[in-house]
Image (spheres, grey):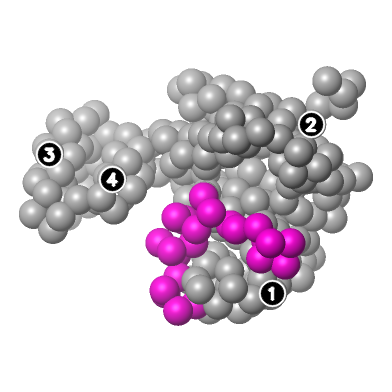
Amino acid sequence: MSSQNVVLYEARDGIARITLNRPEKRNALNDELIQSLKSALRSADNDESVRVVVLSGAGADFCSGADLAALQKISNASVSENLADARSLMELLALIRLVRVPVIAAVRGRALAGGCGLALACDIVLADKSARFGFPEVKIGFVPAMVMAILRRSVSEKKAFELIALGEEISASEAAVIGLINHTFEDADFESEVEAFSQSLVLLSTSALSLSKSLLYKTDGLSFIEALESGADVNVIARMSEDSRLGIKRFLKKS
């Protein structure tokens, strides 16, 4: 273990701010960072005061993917070791979707390979205009295997194949046009825009956002009728919540 905190965590005013903190390595993924990031996400999920999570990277880049030591480990590892390593990353990507509140990726610089997958696993992706996204795995004979499940749900089939087959980086503006990310902001305004976006979510009903997030991702594996049935169940739960009762009461007062 290094003496450096590879993930920084702060929870204040309803927002949990999680920062990848290996700027000298472009926040590259290794075992320590992945485990620390899981711990930070669980802390946010278990803190009832947290209403939004913002994930960012220290320094110039969001996350450049696996670091050189991790790649060397992969090339020399056994089947069982590689499986355990892959499942650890899989657990991280799945955990982001299981956190009860919205998770925002605030992307500066490059988000590449597993780092791009990490950003896309978040519920909202905000980027400065100089940010770059890409899946260069094919260039070293590798496959963006797990993140493909997220990529395929974010863009068209043809665009997804182009991104993984060519392995080229794309700009934040192009990523927004194809639906890979949500919004881009001018570099100088990026921090204030991320803060404003986060605060807009803090003001909303936590229970409604949590139910909406869970239902949205659940519908991927359901038939149309099953999705409607799940929606009906969640509808009833939402109606019975305190947030809904208060919201309806406020709405009726205005009418």
Disc 4 from disc 3: Cα separation = 13 Å
Amino acid type of the residue that numbered disc 1 sits on in the rendered structure: Glu
Q: Position of residue 37 (x, y in %)?
A: 65, 32
* Chief secondary structure of the magenta portion: helix
Instruction: Please state which of the two labelled residues, at mark 3 or mark 1, is closer to the viewer.
Output: 1
* Badge 4: residue crowd in 10 Å (few <14, some 14–19, many ≥20): few
Instruction: Please state which of the two labelled residues, at mark 4 or mark 1, is closer to the viewer.
Output: 1
Q: Position of residue 35 (x, y in %)?
A: 65, 27
Say which residue label 1 marks. 168
* Badge 1: residue crowd in 10 Å (few <14, some 14–19, many ≥20): some
SS under mark 2: loop
Amino acid type of the residue that numbered disc 4 sits on in the rendered structure: Lys
First in residue order: circle 4 vs circle 2:
2
| Circle 2/circle 3 CB separation < 8 Å | no
Instruction: Please state which of the two labelled residues, at mark 4 or mark 3, is closer to the viewer.
Output: 4
Please report the residue visible at 79 percent of the width from the left and 31 percent of the height from the top.
6
Instruction: Please state which of the two labelled residues, at mark 2 or mark 3, is closer to the viewer.
Output: 2
Please report the residue visible at 64 percent of the width from the left and 76 percent of the height from the top.
166
Amino acid type of the residue that numbered disc 2 sits on in the rendered structure: Val
Q: Quadrant of the N terminus?
A: top right
First in residue order: circle 4 vs circle 1:
1
Instruction: From the viewer's perspective, tell me whether residue 179 is left or right of residue 141.
Output: left
Looking at the rendered structure, which numbered label has been put on residue 6? 2
* Badge 2: residue crowd in 10 Å (few <14, some 14–19, many ≥20): many
Q: Position of residue 88 (x, y in %)?
A: 58, 32
Looking at the rendered structure, which numbered label has been put on residue 218? 4
Per the rendered image, the range of residues in magenta is: 137-159
Say which residue label 3 marks. 233
Is 87 situated above or below 223? Answer: above
Disc 4 from disc 2: Cα separation = 32 Å
* Badge 3: residue crowd in 10 Å (few <14, some 14–19, many ≥20): few
| Circle 4/circle 3 CB separation < 8 Å | no
